[in-house]
Amino acid sequence: MDKLESEMGRILFILLSISMISIPLPCLSDEIPPKVILAHADRSRGNIGGIEWIIDLESREGEELHKRKILVKARGNNSLAEFIAPPKVKGQKILMLDRNMWFIKPGLRKPVPISPRQKLMGGASNGDIASTDYAGDYKAELVTEEVFQGEPCHVLDLNAANKNTTYSRIRYWVSKKRLVGVKADFLTISGKLLKSAVFEYGHSIPFQDASIPFISKMIITDEVVKNTVTTLVYTQVNLKNIPDAAFNLNLLRR
Amino acid sequence: MRTLRIFLVYAIFLELAYGLALPIPCTASFADHIFRVGQDQENTSFWTQLPGQLDFTMRTLVYGTYQDVARTTQNPENDFLQIPRYLGNLELRPDIAFSSGRLDLRLKPRMNLRWLAWEEGTREGDEDLEDDWYVNEWLLRLQIDPSLYASYGKENLQWGPSYLFSPSNPFFANNGRLNPIIEIPGMDFARLVWIPRMEWTISLIANTDEGRQEFNSLEFQKTYALKLDYSGHQGSAGLVLSHEEGGEDRIGTFGVWTASDTLLLYTDFNFSRNSNSFYPVPDETSPFNASMQSKNINNSSWKSTAVFGASYTLLFGPTLTLEYLYNEAGYSDEQAELYYQLRKDASEAYTDIESLEGLALMTLGHTADPGIRFFRKNYGILRVNQNNIRNVLNLSFSWIYNIDDSSGIFHSEMEFFVGNHARCFAIGGLYTGEDNEEFGDLLHSFLILGVEYTF
């Protein structure tokens, strides 16, 4: 009897294992816990082993248009953003190590600690140019499903897991098929809408022997300062080994 | 010239040693996954890589300064310090950087043309034109190992979270925040930086020469430091142990805690002993009945200097910063009284008693720069700043208050960006102190207006 039970258990284990491996991930997405959905979406927004990209940032406030070009080096939750154009801001840097941020300005040698909320340009905060770790920073709840721009999406309600986040609440639309965040509403703790963002994924990068979509554009609409639209275009995405020294304040070029 | 010669020798050495500048091999796991979107494979020849390895920025500054000179005992009739009322500056500040593989080279040569005009003192009505050519900073750094870096050069090493003063820094008392237009003169440092883990950094630092710093009445002494940095999930901290040859021992620490996305809490403090700073002491042998003496040399009691601060960013943009500075090394009420009396006596002797002019000059030199960053023990700083107002304007207002003598500085900064290259700036200071108070004993006010153009 024991031998039969043991044999049945082994067969059941093998069948389950085969079914788990053979079913494609998108088909399972309905069953994926919100945390896992977020982890997938984070990967497509830079939270990966080591990556470098250029952000062309444009902020339009009414008739005024302002531009910045930023080189971002990111590894996990650490990132270094260096302004490379226009000349008036060239050499300025924002270093983000987990939740710690510093601003470095040429000529002023002392790095200044800043908070993630401090404004970068237009509707973009300093926290927006870095990679995201929503899976680590927020408690997620799957609230409904909606179609956004013709694409079925999970709608997640994200509440800050601690006080240590740029936004208190985020309503996040994640594509069911691609498992990438396509829209986000950023809210205050009382539910007031601060700004909205939509995301495009025109790049793809290799990840664990597969190819995953990678962010190519983010459009932020400020709901507090009306008529302000900030666009971040991601180009020259480059997976590379970024050493610890790249994020070290003692070694940064100033 | 000496610096330039040293630099040329290094440059030749670098040229010969270019073989060292080979790229560090990537780790196998990543080398297998190098991938670039929208770009061709890199051409690896030296000349095609050079533009990516060389970085050049040229800043040109034109600015004028107005200074309302205070007539005080520190600077009787402006004859002692001879502070000009008007200054006009034209500065060229090229920054050159070259990075290749394991080598990193930086050079910051400077040209400063300056026009000065005096309206007070013996130089009243005088004008002067000066030119100054120098290398403010340079650096040669070699990556010995992916986690180990060695460097030598003329640097301005700054760290710590506080706004006005970083007590844990044994090398630089001035961090440049009060007048960001003026560059802090570099000093010569040898450094070894080891990063055993992402979170930890260990630095050995030797300050080998005064470089462009002026120590006035204090003599430069070589200083050695061991610095340990830690960066955690929502905070960072540092420990700095240092020893000055024949002088001060210091234990410094600093830390920042990102309490939330809006609130930063920080501290920066220092324990020191054997300071060679000057203090006023009663002295019967002096015609002023007091003198400035380095009374703490060989005094093994530790004194503390601590900054506690918090900054909060409001939802609509501005950041409020509040700091308290406790400076145990500062003068007590009795010492301050003696200090101002000594200064008054020296000032009167300087103008009226010819036989005491030399002693008066030395005494005023020591009182002008006694070797401590702040004279008294308790200070408060309130700052409000907002950057990127309509993406073109940065504003900052600070109130620095000496709690012990009630003097203060109201300080403001404005930056306004025009087009892609130009930055207009205005920096103003208003001092509220009197003759026998700390803030206001040299100037009543100052205003700097200028333009920076970056190529």
Image (cartoon, rainbow, N blue to C red):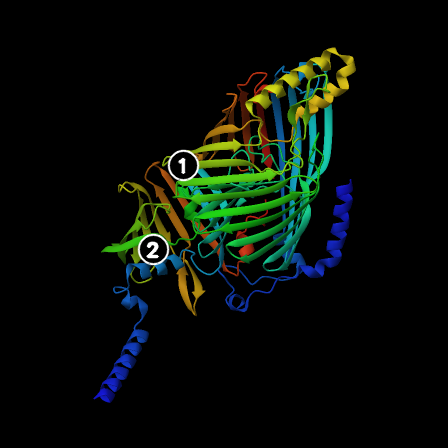
Residue B125 seen in render: no
The answer to whether mark 1 and mark 2 are in CB contact below 8 A is: no
Crowding near the residue tagged with mark 2, few <14, some 14–19, many ≥20 C-alpha atoms within 10 Å: many
- Of all residues, the one furthest to the left in this rendering is A1
Residue B282: percent from left, percent from top: 66, 21
**Disc 2 designates what residue?**
A181
Whether labels 1 and 2 share one chain: no
Distance Cα–Cα, label 1 vs label 2: 30 Å
Q: Residue at x 68, y 41 (%)?
A: B187
* Residues packed near mark 1 inside 10 Å, few (<14), some (14 to 19) or many (20 plus): many
Q: Is residue A177 above or below residue B402?
A: below
Residue B319 higher or lower than B229, as above or below: above
Classify the position of the N terminus of chain B by image quarter: top right
Closer to us: A97 or A93 = A97
Check disc 2 and report its element: helix, strand or loop.
strand
Question: Can residue A7 be seen?
Answer: yes
- Callout 1: SS: strand
Residue that protrudes farthest toward the front in the picture: B284
Q: Name the amino acid type tagged 2.
A: Gly
Classify the position of the C terminus of chain B by image quarter. top right
State the residue at coordinates (48%, 42%): A113
Q: Position of residue B65 (x, y in %)?
A: 61, 23
Say which amino acid is labelled 1: Tyr
User: Pointer 1: what residue?
Assistant: B312
Left or right of A192 on screen, residue B268: right
Name the chain under label 2. A
